[in-house]
Image (cartoon, grey):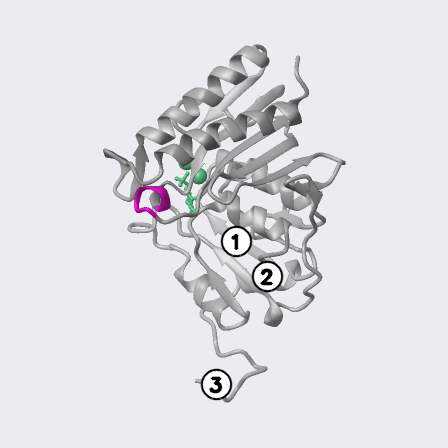
Amino acid sequence: MPDPLTFAIRVAREAGDVVRQGFGKVQRLDFKGAVNPVTETDTAAEALILARLRTAFPDHAILGEETGGSPWNVPGPIWLVDPLDGTNNFAHGFPHFCVSIGLMIAGELQVGVVYDPLRDELFAAQRGAGTTLNGNPIYVTSVARLADAFLATGFGYNRRVAADNNTRRLDNFLRRSQGVRRAGSAALDMAYVACGRFDGYWESSLSPWDLAAGVLLVQEAGGRCSDYTGETTRLHSGREVLVSNGLIHAEMLRVLREGPAAPHPDFPDLV
Ligand code: IPD
Ligand code: CA
Ligand code: CA
């Protein structure tokens, strides 16, 4: 049996080649929901990853976004695969997306790999061994106040109909931080927290394949991951996630619990 981290890195690069070659050549866009697109590249990249996994780890369970599979919380080893995270970006020629592969064993993440094929940036983590970007160790930032923080978020595929579609929280964080980006790839948002490009990220209505690799990248880079109450027990379901450098976590949790926001008290004169 191959080493899982080495394997995940190799397969993420291989799937990344498929994604890079498909970029700008989308022939046909199908929809899994009103605003949830899927392309031939999503399907092709997932087929490649699953074929490699089945050969290398025939006894392991798999949950892939396009093919489904086992429930994420099976007791044994399970691979959580998002072959193309950022499909909306990909489909519109917006160059920001990745391949995300995570391995969980008995509910604990062991390996996480996120690969951005356009920038050739490979983020990798193994439990207890830290996080790397293209082989070099990376760490979360030391920004200690939300007022100094640069954040990311996203809006789930239920955003047209959900009573709570994250716009109120966006308002709350916009008024209290240095800025909020919605770049369109949850896995890269978390990889960017791990390497210090963002200080924190929150989103709800995700799925286990969106989260698995990114959560481990952040944890192993020294950050903290929880749901909006600060708990970790239901984190991997994807229902809601807050990841941060750890230092601003409590402040972000407070904002997530808030009602409609008011101007930041440090800047009363700004309109
Ligand atoms: C989506 C992206 C996006 C997030 C969505 C995800 P997909 O994944 O990560 O940033 O806001 O909720 O579902 O569909 O492109 O793999
Ligand atoms: Ca995704
Ligand atoms: Ca996807």
| Camera-nearest residue between 25 and 125 | 25
Image vertical order of residue 145 relative to residue 187, above or below: below
Q: Are marks 1 and 3 in contact (CB under 8 Å)?
A: no
Residue found 65% across the figure and 60% down from its top:
250
Q: Which residue range is magenta in the image?
A: 89-93
Can residue 106 be spotted in the picture?
A: no
Compute the Cα span from label 1 to label 3.
Answer: 26 Å
Which residue type carries mark 3?
Answer: Leu
Mark 2 element type: helix
- Is 217 left or right of 96, judged from the image as shown? right
- Which residue does the numbered mark 3 point to in the structure image? 270
Q: Are marks 2 and 1 in contact (CB under 8 Å)?
A: yes
- The percent position of residue 110, horizontal first and vertical second, equals 67, 30
Q: Where is the C terminus found, in terms of image quarters?
A: bottom left
Which residue type carries mark 1?
Answer: Trp
Mark 1 element type: strand
| Camera-nearest residue between 173 and 127 | 127
